Amino acid sequence: MIDDLLKKTLDDDLPPDVAAAMKSRFDRFRERSRRKRPRPAFRALLSLKTAWAAVSVLMLVLGGFLQGSGSPNALSGRIAAIGTAQTVSRLLTSAETMSCSARIQRSDGTVLSYEIEWRRSSGTSVAILRPDGTTIGKFEAAESGGNLDPALQDAASLLNPSAVRDLLSENWRPVRTSRDGGGEVGTFSALAPDGRTVLEFDVDVGAYLPVRIRRSVIALPETGEAGNRLWEARLAF
């Protein structure tokens, strides 16, 4: 269009070299205008909708992949375990009370019972019982500090919710789900960095708090001592 206009209006009035120079300037101006022209809003909106549609399809495909035949696979199980672990950790941090009944086999083979009561306002009290039910003694434990009574060393990881949270801080792996007393319970394993199962525990799925912890090998956090000792605890918050 511009070429025709130049031919009709400039051929008779300007020398060819001047006309060519002006045409060149028109061409450059037209090219700059084309490059700077803003993209129409509807095209931008269309691109945004297309992107969201693609994300939605991806999520649907992923959801189908995770749920597939109705049985959990490794990926969906791992995602569920991570979410549960984070929720349990947060709720343990905010707990106000905790009761724990534990049976721990000591290094000499004796199995003792520990009745633990913790209150955020007053700390921890522990009663230790012999296998015949008689009381060995009652102890008080501060929530923090290094002056833990030697009699409580075996139960150090159960004396308050923070200790339980640290106990369950390893990688989680789902094991199974079941129903207990009308509520759903999820069973998980806690894995050490080398992949060994450190302990197994049950979580009340409704409350997202641990209700039972079992361990066949216990390592004392203060000494690192390990032994093949039975260790089981039941908790309520």
Image (tube, grey):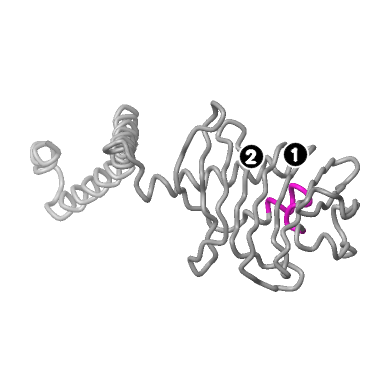
Report the side of 193 relative to 72 (left or right): right
Report the side of 72 relative to 154 (left or right): left
* Numbered disc 1: secondary structure: loop
For the point 54% across and 29% down, the residue is: 183
For disc 2, the marked residue is 209
Range covered by the magenta-colored residues: 156-165
Q: Residues within 10 Å of mark 1 (few under 14, many from 20)?
A: some
Mark sitting earlier along the chain (1/2):
1
Q: Is residue 183 above or below residue 234?
A: above
Can you see residue 39?
no
| Amino acid identity at mark 2 | Leu
For the N terminus, the quadrant is top left
Tell me the chief SS of the magenta region.
helix
Q: Is residue 36 above or below residue 111?
A: above
* Numbered disc 2: secondary structure: strand
Asked whether the residues under the numbered discs 1 and 2 touch, taking CB atoms below 8 Å apart as contact, a structural biologist would say yes
Mark linked to residue 95: 1
| Amino acid identity at mark 1 | Ala
Mark linked to residue 69: none
Q: Where in the figure is residue 156, as x and y percent of width and height?
A: 77, 59
Question: Residue 207 lies in magenta, yes or no?
Answer: no
For the C terminus, the quadrant is top right
Report the side of 122 relative to 224 (left or right): right
Q: Residues within 10 Å of mark 2 (few under 14, many from 20)?
A: many
Query: Could you tell me how far apart the alpha carbons at marks 1 and 2 are, in whole angstroms?
Result: 10 Å
Q: Which residue reaches farthest front?
A: 132
